[in-house]
Image (cartoon, coloured by chain):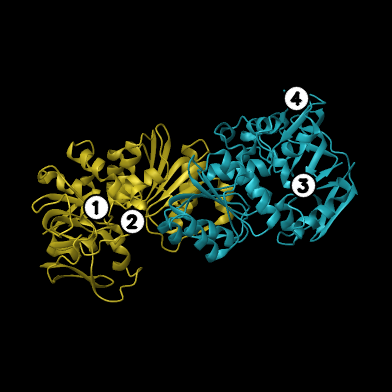
Chain colours: A cyan, B yellow
């Protein structure tokens, strides 16, 4: 088969690779229907995460079950499946409490920009749809694999409540999905921080009521203007930089909450500043698997249309162009089909 | 009048001072019935907080209303009152949301180890009891002024739920009150971290089911032993050091919560560690005023006996001995009466 391999900064190649095989009786092999490039894939592309040696890459996927291991229950070849970027057995103590992305058997998917994928803990990780969905729903279902679920988690971690005010920091696909999630959670006012016109438009389409283009201290000042000087009830931090975290913490009201869902890079939170802010903070890899049944239903019944974050569609063979377009902000998110 | 003045590390003197006066029409003057030394007073006593110039000290108090300013409603001379260490008008936007210790007119009380005290925003800050309580209740009511309310806040911030497991880091008066609060919030298992026998006894009397004497990585390992390797649902961090915070974060289960209520000194939280822990974090100066009516009722009806944290009673004139005894851990908390 063929798939993407990252060799170093700016160097992703579409190569011939060994076909994945069942390694454990709990594995399944999935034939990819669609995959994509994630904002977090740009960390190694930009050299902000080191690439010690060349390796396959990608963690978002929908596809068809090709083969299942001897212990995989509830799945059979031919089914259309959506899975989380973090595998989960759905039976361990953490999974039972809903923390599927903290499963005792968790692995982070990492070979998904390819024609075939090995999915560990397949019975827990994958959710099959009823029949094969119409292809127009595939992009939306694909977002459920990571960015949509991560937006949902941002809203949960930031404790978005009906009637509240939410700020979303970050206008990548996760930030845009976080706007959708804040809307779904009943936020009355949703302030999207974005300086990119096409992303501002999509944020408004997803439910943002206000757009703030300023950043840093000026961005915080604008949030204060818009909230009678109090700050927001919830801030959904969807970037992962220290600047974004600072903006999030300073934009929340006393007693408000920040949910942070971008993998932090160089973020240190000063204990005394957090203390005197009275702001609550929770983050982590999204427990996407917990949300999948709800998200799949919302997409298939056309109540949400998160697939709109894909503004570039490419053949999987052109995966490197997907990275380039996202890095240069020519695209919000690149859809890849084998 | 006379009161305590701190001149520098280890140097608290009982001196003659000007009688406090009404400075603003929202002030009241309170004649102190009882005051005390707080663990946080030990930071400047130990030189860990600088004392630039000599100043009065102390922030916990119960007493009798002596005089009220022209705009103070609902209070009259002779009433017995309990007040928070943080003043609040109870009418601003933050107060209305319950964040009384983030009041727009907040001042931190700082002259309370004295015979008379000026209390700003008196109508909001002070709660009068029905009649003058029996003197045996004064110590318990005095704890409501800070340490008891701070324990309550630790339990709220750490989201203690009925049937859950809570860990309390710190065995000072706040930590012991946090045990009481966790018990009141319905925690089924309460693990107190303490290596001091008299404090362990009081922790058990207040509701602790287990005591862990180890610290650091060994302390965390013991918590894991006691929680089937999962970690606690809630950790109440009542110290304020980086070591205590590390212990708290590592002792919580994925999806668990840490409430931190000791003013952080040299605490920095690594964003990536917090992210991958899935632990929620909230702290701050306790919104004591919000809890006062409930706490006063619990004390006066003998449903809790937080006054037991006072294991040393001194005349106010001997205030320096109170500091010394607490610093040397000869006393948990020193009660001072004029």
The circle on residue B279 is none
| x and y, in percent, of residue A175 in the image | 63, 50
Left or right for B263, reference A2: left
Q: Is residue A295 above or below residue A168?
A: above
Q: Are marks 2 and 3 on the same chain?
A: no
Mark 4 Cα within 10 Å, few/some/many (few <14, many 20+)? some
Relative to the observer, which residue lies in front, A82 or B27?
A: B27
In the picture of the structure, the residue carrying the numbered disc 1 is B124
Q: Chain of mark 2?
A: B
Mark 4: which secondary structure?
loop
Structural distance between the alpha carbons of marks 1 and 4? 62 Å
Q: Are marks 2 and 1 in contact (CB under 8 Å)?
A: yes
Quadrant placement of the C terminus of chain B: bottom left
Structural distance between the alpha carbons of marks 3 and 1? 57 Å
In the picture of the structure, the residue carrying the numbered disc 4 is A75
Q: Is residue A285 visible?
A: no
In the picture of the structure, the residue carrying the numbered disc 2 is B103
Quadrant placement of the N terminus of chain B: bottom left
| x and y, in percent, of residue A238 in the image | 61, 52
Structural distance between the alpha carbons of marks 2 and 1? 10 Å
Mark 2: which secondary structure?
loop
Q: Are marks 4 and 2 in contact (CB under 8 Å)?
A: no
In the picture of the structure, the residue carrying the numbered disc 3 is A58
Pair 3/1: label in front: 1
Relative to the observer, which residue lies in front, A302 or B138?
A: A302
Left or right for A202, reference A279: right
Q: Chain of mark 3?
A: A
| x and y, in percent, of residue B168 in the image | 38, 45
């Amino acid at each position: 088969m063929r798939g993407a391999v990252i060799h170093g900064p700016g160097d992703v190649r579409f190569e011939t690779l060994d076909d994945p095989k069942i390694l454990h009786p709990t594995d399944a092999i999935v034939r990819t229907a669609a995959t994509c490039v994630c904002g977090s894939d740009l960390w190694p592309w930009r050299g902000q995460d080191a690439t010690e040696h060349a390796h396959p890459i990608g963690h978002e996927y929908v596809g068809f079950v090709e083969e299942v291991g001897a212990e995989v229950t509830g799945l059979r070849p031919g089914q259309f499946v959506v899975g989380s970027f973090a595998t989960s057995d759905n039976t361990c103590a953490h999974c039972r409490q809903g923390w599927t992305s903290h499963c005792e058997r968790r692995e982070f998917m990492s070979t998904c920009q390819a024609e075939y994928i090995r999915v560990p803990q397949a019975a827990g990780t994958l959710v099959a749809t009823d029949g094969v969905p119409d292809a127009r729903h595939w992009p939306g279902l694909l977002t459920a694999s990571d960015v949509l679920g991560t937006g949902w988690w941002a809203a949960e971690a930031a404790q978005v409540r009906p009637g509240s005010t939410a700020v979303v920091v970050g206008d990548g696909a996760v930030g845009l999905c976080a706007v959708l999630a804040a809307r779904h959670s009943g936020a009355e006012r949703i302030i999207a921080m974005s300086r990119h016109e096409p992303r501002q438009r999509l944020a408004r389409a997803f439910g943002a009521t206000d757009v703030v283009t300023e950043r840093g201290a000026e961005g915080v000042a604008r949030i204060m203007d818009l909230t009678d000087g109090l700050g927001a009830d919830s801030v959904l931090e969807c970037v992962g930089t220290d600047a974004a975290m600072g903006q999030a913490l300073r934009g929340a009201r006393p007693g408000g909450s920040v949910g942070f869902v971008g993998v932090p890079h160089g973020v240190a939170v000063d204990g005394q500043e957090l203390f005197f802010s009275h702001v609550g903070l929770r983050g982590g890899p999204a427990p996407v698997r917990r949300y999948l049944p709800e998200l799949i239903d919302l997409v298939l019944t056309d109540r949400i249309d998160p697939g709109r974050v894909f503004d570039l569609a490419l053949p999987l063979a052109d995966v490197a162009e997907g990275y380039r377009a996202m890095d240069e902000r020519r695209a919000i998110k690149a859809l890849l089909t084998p």
